[in-house]
Image (spheres, helix red, strand yellow):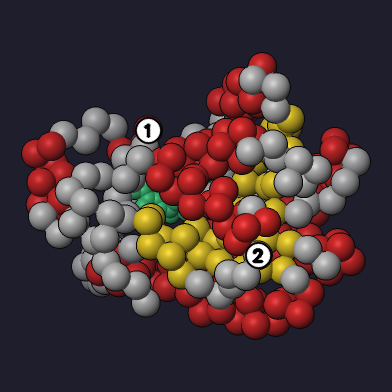
Amino acid sequence: MKSKVALVTGASRGIGKSMAIKLAEDGLKVVVNYNSNREKAESIVYDIQHSGGEAIAIQADVTSEDDVKKLVSRSQEAFGQTIDILVNNATGPQPELSLENVSWEDYLDQLHFTAKAPLLLLKEIMPSMKEKQWGRVINIGSEVIEIGNPEFSNYVTAKSAVVGMTRSWANELGTHNITVNAVHPGFTPVERHGEVTEENARGYLKGVPLNRLGKPDDIANMVCFLASEEAGFITGQNINVNGGNTFGV
Ligand SMILES: NC(=O)c1ccc[n+]([C@@H]2O[C@H](COP(=O)([O-])OP(=O)(O)OC[C@H]3O[C@@H](n4cnc5c(N)ncnc54)[C@H](OP(=O)(O)O)[C@@H]3O)[C@@H](O)[C@H]2O)c1
């Protein structure tokens, strides 16, 4: 895997940060994509480089066609080779909205991240994956698609699209040795959640057989596996990493 390049969208913080660090630890060259947090992205790159890895931070709004084109070409310039592994992880704000208050625009806001950005990126990266007859696409979903959380239909609907999209892409790209899978995290506290106390989490943990919350590294470990050579016979799958809170679609 040492010669391969991985792009992680939204890798300046949260779960994406762990993915970038762990993929780099596995010897991959990593593109740390960010939207606004340049300093954080640069500090992740600094840490990776100081541990002997290779990484570059590239700003791009992955919901913008122009930005996606620039992101992919800048990555190729930086590493002198095309992207082998695409991790569609970036997410924007996720407001909880009742059916009275939610609008079609709110649905679209989420679909821009779960369907539009992955599609723009795939279309830009797929030709070189086909040429190489090797590729990995890993879409990040969420367990909410099985729970159907109320007052969150904007996010739940958009994340549900990841399931069918992953299966359709897997069917279409399999003959090119490009695998496409989705990873569905459970509640995984990150910076944006602030402090999560046991009290906050108790209700949620009642349904979790492994009786703990997710850690970003739990999700990153699965992404690293799906990115690896060893996962080459796995495609079209929706894999939950949520301590058993749900059992799969
Ligand atoms: N954490 C959880 O409990 C949980 C549970 C289930 C599923 N997930 C899923 O896991 C993934 C990561 O979640 P997270 O909690 O780690 O998210 P997060 O902490 O909110 O981080 C979001 C990342 O996306 C980036 N981003 C935002 N808008 C962007 C844009 N337009 N273009 C490019 N990057 C953009 C942010 O970059 P800047 O900082 O530069 O703006 C940041 O790096 C998401 O797909 C989320 O839906 C998370």
Task: Indicate the position of residue 199 as horizontal and vertical percent values.
Answer: 9, 39
- Callout 2: SS: loop
Position of 48 relative to 77 (above/below): above
**Which residue is at 58% across, 69% downward?**
234
Is residue 93 visible in the rendered structure shown here?
no
The residue indicated by pointer 2 is 232
How many residues crowd around disc 2 within 10 Å: few (fewer than 14), some, or many (20 or more)? Answer: some
How many residues crowd around disc 1 within 10 Å: few (fewer than 14), some, or many (20 or more)? Answer: few
Position of 211 relative to 140 (above/below): above
Residue, far top: 50
**Which residue is at 84% across, 51% downward?**
82
Mark 1 residue CB less than 8 A from any atom of ligand 1: yes
Decide which of tag 2 and tag 1 comes sooner along the chain: 1
The residue indicated by pointer 1 is 191
Task: Indicate the position of residue 127 as horizontal and vertical percent values.
Answer: 85, 67
- Amino acid type, callout 2: Gly
Q: Quadrant of the C terminus?
A: bottom left
Task: Indicate the position of residue 159 as horizontal and vertical percent values.
Answer: 43, 67
- Callout 1: SS: helix
**Which residue is at 34% across, 72% downward?**
248
Q: In the figure, is residue 219 to the left or right of 21?
A: left
Is residue 26 visible in the rendered structure shown here?
yes
**Which residue is at 63% across, 38% downward?**
26
